[in-house]
């Protein structure tokens, strides 16, 4: 059996996702589908992943690196390996509520919202993981 580089990369990415606490309880098949739906991006320090009050069309899973979350220019949080970034706009179906800037080199899985809806329908544990991440942030902030 022969694998394409993309297949190997997807399997490695799914394994990376499986190791993240945010996806505890999500089965390997769902994580493989998530890995296939997204695109890995590499971003330098100082890059804006998203900007406050702008429309949202994607979210990210941080695979390496660190980001700062800023609300009205004030740093309100730091997000690292395993964090979901931008899921609030997905869960609440609103504009971005913060700006997120890379602090270090960042490797992240970018997921378009249009790709997540069918995955959530097929794999409810994935949607639960995204909602739980947002609920956890809301509990800490509130």
Image (cartoon, rainbow, N blue to C red):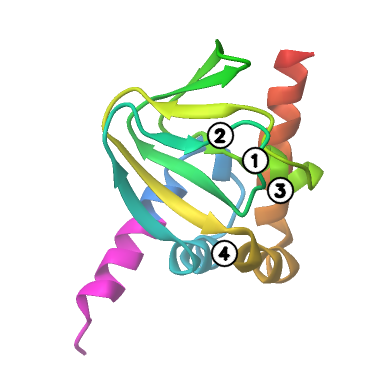
Closest to the camera, between mark 3 and mark 1, is 1
- Residue 111: assigned label: none
The front one of 39 and 131 is 39
The answer to whether residue 82 is visible is: no
Q: Which residues are magenta?
A: 1-14
Give me the residue at 43% from left, 34% from top: 48
Query: Mark 1 = which residue?
Result: 54
Q: Is residue 106 magenta?
A: no
The front one of 31 and 46 is 46
Q: Quadrant of residue 126?
A: bottom right
Which quarter of the rendering shows the C terminus?
A: top right
Asked if labels 2 and 1 touch by Cβ distance under 8 angstroms, the answer is yes
Q: Give coordinates of residue 32: x percent, y percent.
A: 47, 66
Disc 4 or 2, which lies upstream in sequence? 4
Give me the residue at 60% from left, 40% from top: 86
Query: Mark 3 = which residue?
Result: 90
Asked if labels 1 and 3 touch by Cβ distance under 8 angstroms, the answer is no
Disc 3 or 2, which lies upstream in sequence? 2
**In this view, 93 is above or below 50:** below
Closest to the camera, between mark 4 and mark 3, is 3
């Amino acid at each position: 059996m022969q694998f394409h580089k993309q297949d190997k990369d997807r399997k490695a990415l799914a394994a990376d996702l499986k190791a993240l606490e945010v996806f505890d309880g999500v089965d390997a098949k769902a994580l493989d589908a998530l890995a296939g739906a997204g695109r890995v991006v590499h971003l330098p320090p100082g890059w804006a992943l998203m900007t406050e009050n702008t429309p949202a069309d994607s979210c990210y899973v941080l695979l390496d690196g660190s980001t700062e979350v800023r609300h009205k220019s004030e740093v309100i949080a730091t997000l690292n390996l395993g964090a979901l970034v931008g899921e609030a706009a997905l869960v609440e179906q609103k504009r971005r509520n913060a700006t997120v800037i890379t602090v270090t080199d960042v490797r992240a899985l970018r997921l378009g919202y249009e790709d997540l809806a069918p995955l959530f329908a097929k794999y409810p544990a994935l949607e639960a993981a995204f909602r739980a991440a947002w609920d956890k942030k809301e509990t800490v902030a509130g």
